Image: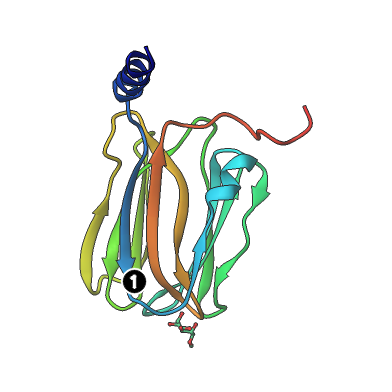
């Protein structure tokens, strides 16, 4: 009986469609590690602030729902702000890296391409493994620039799960 229960639980779990995947990490080994996993509770990604100077992606801040994450990186270069449209999600991030992140190209499910940074280094294409999944949060390492970056994909989330309704 116990074996039968265990077997059914295992088979049910195995039959669940998978949805989570990870792309990365792209960049070098410097900086301090960060993960925005907990920011998902504020809602889906709705805007980005990306800073770049003539060589590197120097800073990153991500808006989850209506709440901006902590700013990662340094103050060199210019800050660019990108707002997504309602229902728009990031479905691919390509770019270049060497010991640091050099270039990021955000591609959305509405066919927009948002590019920032320099064409130098090794190319990467970060895409989700499973259909209909989108960028849910970033992780990586930063110091005075963004040293490395990784992308976490899953089904789109709805709104803030811990805000008062
Ligand atoms: C800091 C430090 C390093 C990191 C660089 C670039 C200037 O040094 O955090 O570990 O590699 O910034 O982000």
**Can you say which quadrant of the picture contains the N terminus?**
top left
**Can you say which quadrant of the picture contains the C terminus?**
top right
Which residue is rendered at x = 36% and y = 79% of the image? 55
Whether 19 is drawn above or below 93: the answer is: above
Relative depth, front residue between 140 and 127: 140
| Res 41 → quadrant | top right
Mark 1 and ligand 1: say if the CB distance to the nearest ligand atom is below 8 Å.
no
Q: Is residue 106 left or right of residue 36?
A: left
Which residue is rendered at x = 60% and y = 38% of the image? 43
Identity of the residue furthest to the right in this view: 164
Identity of the residue furthest to the left in this view: 122
The residue that label 1 is drawn on is: 102
In the structure shown, which secondary structural element does the residue marked by tag 1 occupy?
strand
Whether 143 is drawn above or below 79: the answer is: below
> Residue 4, percent across and down?
33, 14
Q: How many marks?
A: 1
Which residue is rendered at x = 50% and y = 30% of the image? 87
Relative depth, front residue between 110 and 14: 14
| Res 92 → quadrant | top left
Question: How crowded is the residue under tag 1: few (<14 C-alpha within 10 Å), some, or many (20+)?
Answer: many
Relative depth, front residue between 19 and 98: 19
> Residue 141, percent across and down?
45, 70
Whether 65 is drawn above or below 58: the answer is: above
Q: Is residue 129 left or right of residue 110?
A: left
> Residue 9, percent across and down?
37, 20
> Residue 103, percent across and down?
33, 66
One can see residue 102 in this view: yes
Which residue is rendered at x = 51% and y = 81% of the image? 144
| Res 65 → quadrant | top right
One can see residue 115 in this view: no
């Amino acid at each position: 009986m116990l074996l039968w229960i265990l077997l059914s639980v295992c088979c049910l779990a195995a039959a669940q469609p998978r949805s989570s995947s990870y792309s990365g990490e792209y960049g070098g080994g410097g900086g301090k590690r960060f993960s925005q996993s907990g920011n998902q509770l504020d809602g889906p990604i709705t805007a980005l602030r990306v800073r770049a100077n003539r060589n590197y992606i120097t800073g990153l801040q991500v808006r989850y729902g209506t709440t901006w994450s902590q700013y990662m990186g340094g103050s060199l270069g210019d800050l660019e702000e990108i707002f997504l449209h309602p229902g728009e999600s990031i479905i691919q991030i390509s770019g270049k890296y060497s010991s640091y992140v050099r270039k990021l190209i955000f591609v959305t499910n509405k066919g927009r391409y948002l590019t920032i940074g320099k064409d130098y280094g090794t190319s990467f294409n970060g895409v989700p493994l499973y259909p209909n999944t989108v960028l849910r949060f970033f992780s990586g390492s930063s110091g005075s620039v963004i040293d490395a970056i990784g992308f976490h994909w899953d089904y789109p989330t709805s709104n803030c799960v811990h805000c008062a309704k």
